[in-house]
Image (spheres, rainbow, N blue to C red):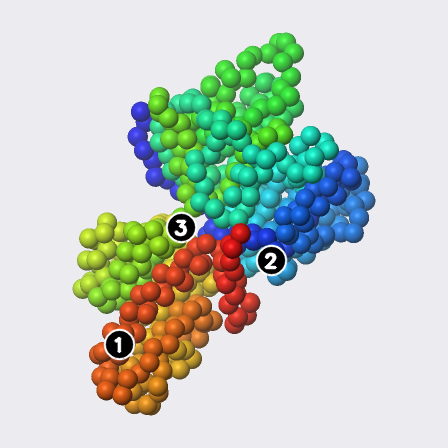
């Protein structure tokens, strides 16, 4: 068996997680960035199906005016897409269909708006170009599979819903469920092609579209990625050519794993070769596991795949599986004894922190007790001192090297550099031992806060979990809980009671973010429920 690899694919932007969809509150933007619907009635059936699931559909255009194989002029399609990239009103973008045309839009997308307002992009085939560009330039994960006209309209041409197994797998991903190993809609398992074990970012889609992106600034670096591919309507010699292009560009050798999906409507007219032989030849260039038989592509019953998330591919003689990792990788910054860090790490170990892995402990002090607590739990540690110079850049490189998605400050007595705050905007939390905005600001931490509360004679203090902004203790409040101040309280006993509340609230706040249940609108923080709740 090949050795296990732990490689990562690094886009030019740190991946960010859009909120999972929730029926009754979710709005879906309908876009046609490529070709127009072949059957307008089927498109309307697909829209009706989504509405029946509890989603409001927001149309980007009142009507499509096809321009040959395009769903409109480049300007019309671009205006529609950029409107939704800039919108606060929708949580996801569902594509009418593929066809052709997404490539023409890539240079003109508003990637800054996309980065600031992440959404779930759903589609496949030609939409592969958008998935790759938005992951690379704006950090967007997405879902590859299912489109409104061809899939949500019904699988038999007259039904009002997708194939039930396909439907179940898709909504589990879209609504944030923890995925199981990916099987086909009716339980089809992957087949082994080349043994090994790999972990990396899951990327891919239509093979032709991926090949067209080679050499452009819109294809993410594939170093350490697990790549999945499918194709339709191409003869074996053309599939050979597409895979050769990936090989000659050095992509196949840089992958940590490869998964072949469905290759449909391949023309077998002679002279030809068995497609399986072609795929096996190119699999040999991958320095890691390769699997085939993924039920994904231009077929009625298909699996939907997450794009831009970490995954594990295991190929052995006994078992072959692809498992997306839903975990948010959390870094904790701490300067002191580490009791709050321990509360977060222990919650993760108990499974009450949600889909979160505590991946890194960062401290500015060599003697911080939190470092020992992290060592005891097998959690990676790092020191980063502001006085060493270039602090922001060093922190960002450190967090990127550990694939960190989210940061929690836990008794960290340094001001986080503005570039780091900006990079983790709405993805960095802190805790404060009072009911902010009371007793906050520079110099207000620990015992000083409790002494101030007692000096002012307040009847209530408490604990606050808040988002981090550039200034001390000014970020929007996520959770708060009051604690009564007793007449005979010394600072120490008051601190102990507040600390107990902090240790309960903080894991809850991290879990809410990891589950995608938090929406930030200015200074307002809203927390949503889950499907069926």
The disc label shown at residue 238, or none: none
Q: Residue shown at 64%/21% (left/top)?
A: 265
Label 1 packing within 10 angstroms: few (<14), some (14-19), many (20+): some
Pick the quarter of the image with the N terminus: top left
CB within 8 Å, label 3 to label 2: no
Residue 151 x %, y %: 65, 36
Label 2 packing within 10 angstroms: few (<14), some (14-19), many (20+): few
Label 1, secondary structure: give it: helix
**Pointer 1 residue:** 495
Distance, label 3 to label 2, CA atoms, is 22 Å
The disc label shown at residue 25, or none: 2
Q: Is residue 259 above or below residue 366?
A: above
Q: In the rendered image, is residue 7 in sight?
A: yes
CB within 8 Å, label 3 to label 1: no
Residue 403 x %, y %: 39, 49
Mark toward the start of the polypeptide (2 vs 1): 2
Distance, label 2 to label 1, CA atoms, is 39 Å
Residue 250 x %, y %: 46, 31
**Pointer 3 residue:** 355
Q: Residue shown at 23%/67% (left/top)?
A: 336
Distance, label 3 to label 1, CA atoms, is 30 Å
Q: Residue shown at 28%/56% (left/top)?
A: 346
Residue lying farthest front? 533
**Left or right: where 437 falls relative to 210:** left
Q: Is residue 103 above or below residue 358?
A: above
Residue 172 x %, y %: 52, 43
Mark toward the start of the polypeptide (3 vs 1): 3
Q: Residue shown at 70%/42% (left/top)?
A: 46
**Left or right: where 16 falls relative to 263:** left
């Amino acid at each position: 068996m090949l050795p296990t690899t732990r490689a990562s694919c690094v886009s030019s932007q740190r991946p960010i997680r859009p909120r999972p969809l929730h029926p009754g509150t979710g709005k879906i933007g309908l876009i046609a960035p490529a070709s127009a619907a072949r059957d307008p009635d089927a498109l309307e059936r697909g829209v009706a199906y989504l509405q029946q699931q509890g989603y409001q559909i927001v149309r980007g255009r009142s009507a499509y005016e096809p321009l040959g194989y395009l769903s409109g002029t480049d300007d019309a399609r671009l205006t529609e897409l950029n409107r939704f990239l800039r919108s606060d009103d929708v949580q996801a973008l569902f594509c009418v269909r593929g066809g052709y045309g997404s490539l023409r839009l890539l240079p003109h997308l508003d990637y800054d708006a996309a980065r600031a307002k992440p959404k779930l992009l759903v589609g496949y085939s030609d939409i592969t170009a958008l998935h790759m560009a938005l992951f690379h330039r704006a950090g967007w994960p997405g879902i590859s599979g299912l489109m409104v006209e061809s899939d949500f309209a019904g699988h038999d041409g007259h039904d009002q819903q997708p194939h039930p197994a396909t439907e179940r797998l898709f909504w589990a991903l879209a609504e944030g469920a923890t995925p199981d190993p990916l099987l086909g809609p009716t339980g089809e398992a992957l087949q082994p092609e080349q043994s090994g074990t790999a972990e990396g970012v899951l990327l891919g889609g239509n093979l032709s579209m991926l090949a067209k992106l080679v050499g452009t600034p819109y294809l993410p670096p594939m170093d350490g990625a697990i790549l999945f591919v499918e194709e339709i309507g191409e003869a074996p010699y053309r599939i050979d050519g597409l895979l050769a292009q990936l090989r000659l560009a050095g992509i196949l050798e840089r992958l940590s794993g490869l998964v072949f999906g469905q290759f449909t409507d391949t023309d077998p007219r002679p002279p030809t070769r068995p497609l399986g032989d072609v795929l096996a030849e190119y699999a040999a260039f991958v320095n890691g596991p390769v699997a085939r038989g993924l039920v994904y592509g231009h077929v009625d019953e298909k699996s939907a795949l997450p794009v831009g998330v970490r995954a594990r591919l295991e190929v052995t003689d006994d078992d072959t599986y692809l498992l997306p990792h839903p975990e948010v990788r959390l870094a904790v910054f701490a300067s002191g004894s580490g009791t709050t860090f321990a509360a977060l790490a222990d919650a993760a170990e108990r499974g009450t922190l949600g889909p979160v892995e505590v991946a890194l402990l960062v401290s500015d002090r060599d003697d911080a007790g939190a470092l020992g607590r992290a060592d005891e739990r097998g959690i990676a540690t790092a020191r980063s001192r502001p006085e060493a110079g270039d602090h922001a850049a060093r922190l960002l490189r450190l967090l990127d090297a550990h694939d960190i998605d989210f940061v929690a400050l836990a008794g960290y007595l340094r001001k986080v550099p503005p570039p780091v705050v900006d990079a983790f905007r709405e993805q960095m939390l802190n805790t404060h031992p009072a009911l902010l905005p009371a007793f906050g600001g520079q110099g207000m931490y620990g015992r000083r806060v409790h002494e101030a509360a007692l000096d002012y004679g307040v009847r209530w203090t408490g604990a606050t979990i808040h988002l981090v902004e550039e200034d001390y203790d000014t970020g929007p409040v996520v959770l708060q809980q009051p604690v009564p101040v007793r007449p005979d309280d010394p600072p120490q006993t008051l601190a102990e009671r507040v600390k107990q509340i902090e240790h309960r609230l903080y894991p809850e706040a991290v879990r809410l973010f990891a589950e995608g249940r938090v929406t930030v609108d200015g200074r307002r923080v809203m927390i949503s429920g889950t499907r069926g709740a």
